[in-house]
């Protein structure tokens, strides 16, 4: 009897082994493995595509930001160039005005007697005031006269047929001298 039990046990084990082997083979066939691997690769590729699209969107956004910054920098450079040209023009006008300005010599005596003053001595300041009243209006005097009447630099430059830079320079020099 032990032989029969042993034979039945071996047959049951062999049957169980064959059953499990068959079940495992059906569960893990090469087609199924290939299908699972393909699904996993597809998921990885999809995830990589989404990541790449996000990175491209970030790069495009940064490129647009850089383009805007470059445009602003170009505008500022143009403004700086124009301001530099204005400054150069102002320097040229100032040097031109400086050359055309009459500087009294220091060799003159501090006071003189005029024949029409009936022997009164005039101080140097009074002489300068009289000279300013007697001399024809220069560009500086004309600008300051119109500016004193309340005209803007644009209108003054049109009336006197001078550049706005010259008028602005004369006004600013007068303001600095007044301060």
Image: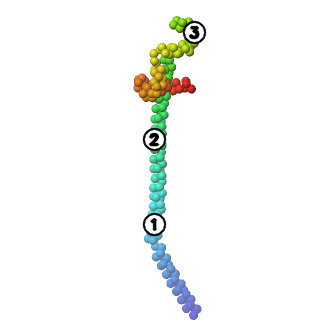
Please name the residue shown 50% across and 14% down the image.
Answer: 131
Disc assigned to residue 121:
3
Regarding mark 2 in the picture, which secondary structure is present there?
Answer: helix
Instruction: Of the two numbered discs 1 and 2 on the same chain, state the one appearing first in sequence.
Output: 1
Disc assigned to residue 71:
2
Regarding mark 3 in the picture, which secondary structure is present there?
Answer: strand
Quadrant housing residue 104: top right
Question: In 3D space, how far apart are the residues under numbered discs 1 and 2 (Cα atoms)?
Answer: 48 Å
Regarding mark 1 in the picture, which secondary structure is present there?
Answer: helix
Instruction: Of the two numbered discs 2 and 3 on the same chain, state the one appearing first in sequence.
Output: 2
Residue 10 place in picture, x, y as percent? 54, 86
Decide if residue 167 is in sight here: no
Q: Residues within 10 Å of mark 3 (few under 14, many from 20)?
A: few
Q: Is residue 88 above or below residue 101?
A: below
**Between tags 1 and 3, which lies in front?**
3
**Between tags 2 and 3, which lies in front?**
3
Label 1 belongs to which residue? 39
Quadrant of the image containing the N terminus: bottom right
Please name the residue shown 48% across and 62% down the image.
Answer: 44
Question: In 3D space, how far apart are the residues under numbered discs 1 and 3 (Cα atoms)?
Answer: 114 Å
Q: Residues within 10 Å of mark 2 (few under 14, many from 20)?
A: few
Viewer-proximal residue among 89 and 29 = 89
Residue 85 place in picture, x, y as percent? 47, 29
Residue positioned most to the bottom = 1
Viewer-proximal residue among 115 and 46 = 115
Q: Residues within 10 Å of mark 1 (few under 14, many from 20)?
A: few
Q: Is residue 64 left or right of residue 13?
A: left
Q: Is residue 60 above or below residue 31?
A: above
Please name the residue shown 55% across and 24% down the image.
Answer: 177
Instruction: Of the two numbered discs 1 and 3 on the same chain, state the one appearing first in sequence.
Output: 1
Please name the residue shown 52% across and 24% down the image.
Answer: 174
């Amino acid at each position: 009897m032990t032989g029969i039990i042993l034979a039945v046990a071996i047959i049951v084990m062999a049957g169980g082994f064959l059953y499990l082997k068959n079940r495992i083979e059906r569960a893990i066939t090469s087609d199924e493995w290939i299908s699972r691997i393909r699904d996993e690769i597809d998921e990885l590729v999809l995830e990589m595509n989404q990541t790449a699209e996000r990175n491209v969107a970030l790069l495009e956004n940064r490129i647009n930001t850089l383009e805007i910054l470059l445009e602003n920098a170009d505008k500022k450079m143009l403004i700086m160039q124009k301001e530099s040209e204005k400054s150069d023009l102002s320097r040229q006008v100032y040097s031109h005005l400086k050359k055309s300005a009459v500087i009294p010599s220091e060799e003159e005596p501090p006071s003189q007697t005029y024949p029409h003053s009936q022997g009164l001595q005039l101080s140097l300041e009074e002489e300068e005031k009289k000279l300013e009243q007697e001399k024809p209006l220069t560009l500086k005097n004309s600008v300051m006269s119109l500016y004193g009447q309340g005209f803007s630099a644009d209108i003054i430059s049109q009336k006197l047929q001078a550049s706005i830079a010259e008028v602005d320079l004369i006004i600013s020099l007068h303001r600095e001298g007044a301060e």
